[in-house]
Image: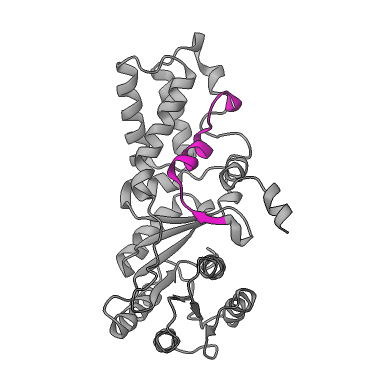
Amino acid sequence: MAASDDKKPGLFARLRSRLNRGNSILTRDLGDLLPGGRIDEDTLEELETRLLMADVGIEATEHILEGLRSRLRRSELADVNALLAALRAEIVEILKPCEQALEIPKDGGIPFVIMSVGINGAGKTTTLGKLARRFKDAGHSVMLAAGDTFRAAAIEQLQAWGERNGVPVIAQAHGADPAAVAHDAWQAAVRRDADVLMVDTAGRLHTQQGLMDELAKVRRVLQRCHPQAPQEVLLVLDGGIGQNALVQARQFHQAVGVTGLAITKLDGSAKGGVLLAIARELALPIRYIGIGESAEDLQPFDAEAFAAALAGDGDDHL
C-alpha cells in the first residue's frame, strides 16, 4: 500500500488533469488567437467569455478583467506567458483570502463541533467520513453523530465510515429528531472527552424553508449545550453544479451562518471556476476540496495550486 501511495501523483497534479481534463478551458488554444503574439482588447474579450463559461461569475470575471486591462495599459502583457502569469495572479488574489485551514485546538477544553450542511447528493456524509480519518490521523479523538435521520441509508453510511476509521458513531432510530441526536452526541462527546464531534445533517434544498429552519434548530440546540458550539458550520458543495453552488452558499449562509466550505466532486467538472464566484461574493473560508473517492483525495485548499490547475501553467496548455 505504501509503495502505491508513493507512486500516486500529487493532489494538484491530479486536480489539474481532472479539473481541466488535461486542457484548461481558460487557456486552451489561446495562443492561436493572438495576432503576431500580441495581447490586445480582443484577447481579453475572448478570455472574458471563457471565464464566464468556466462558471467564474460576472462579479469575479469583471474584477479579473479590470486587473488585466490595467496591466495591458501599463504594457505588462508582452506575450502569452505574461498574460497567463497575470491571469493566475488575479485568480490567486481572489482566492488567497479564502485559503483558511480548519484548525482543531489540541486542548480546547470542550469538543470542537463541526456541523455539516448542504443539499442531497453533495457528499456531506462522505466528507465527514474522510475528515474523521484525517483528524484521527492527526492525533485527535473523534466522534460522529448521525443527524441525517430522514434516510436510514445515511445512518448506515456514517456507521460504516465509523467502523472503517475506528470512530464511534452516535445514532438514533430512523425518523428521530435531529436536534435530539445532536444533543445526545454532545453529551457523549463530553463524557468521552472527545476532541472533535462531527454532526451530519439531512440534505435539503436551499429553497425548503421548513427544513432550513430545522437546521437552525439543530444549531440552537448545540449552542445551548455550549455557547461556542458549533465552532464550525461546514457547507459541503458539489463543485460540478456551476452557479447553483453560489446560490446554495448564499442561502445556507443566510440560514445558519456558514463558517467554512468543502467543495467536492471537482474531478467530475471541466470548469471549477465557481470557487472564484463564491470567494468574490461571500469571502467564506474554503477549507477543503475533493477530487476523488479516496480519503486522500480530500485535501486542504491551496489557492496558488488551484489557480495553476484552473488556468494552466505555461506553454503546455497553448
Left or right side of 303 for 127: right
Q: Quadrant of the N terminus?
A: bottom right
Instruction: Please name the residue shown 46% across and 15% down the image.
Output: 79
| Quarter holding residue 193 | bottom left
Residue 152, image quadrant: bottom right
Q: Position of residue 128 (x, y in %)?
A: 52, 69
Point 56% across, 78% down: residue: 167
Task: Give the residues drawn in magenta, as a range.
Answer: 298-318
Image quarter where the C terminus lies is: top right
- Whether 284 is drawn above or below 137: the answer is above
Residue 26 x, y percent position in the rendering: 51, 32
- Residue 318 visible (yes or no): yes
Q: Is residue 48 visible?
A: no
Q: Residue 225: x and y, percent?
A: 32, 85
Q: Residue at the left extreme? A: 227
Among the 4 quarters of the image, the one containing residue 101: bottom left
Q: Is residue 137 magenta?
A: no
- How many discs appear? 0
Please say if 158 is above or below 309. below
Q: Position of residue 203 (x, y in %)?
A: 49, 71
Residue drawn where x is 56% and y is 66% of the image: 130
Rendered residue at 36%/50% (across/down) = 98
Query: In the picture shown, does residue 311 fall above or below 264?
Result: above
In this picture the colour scheme is one colour
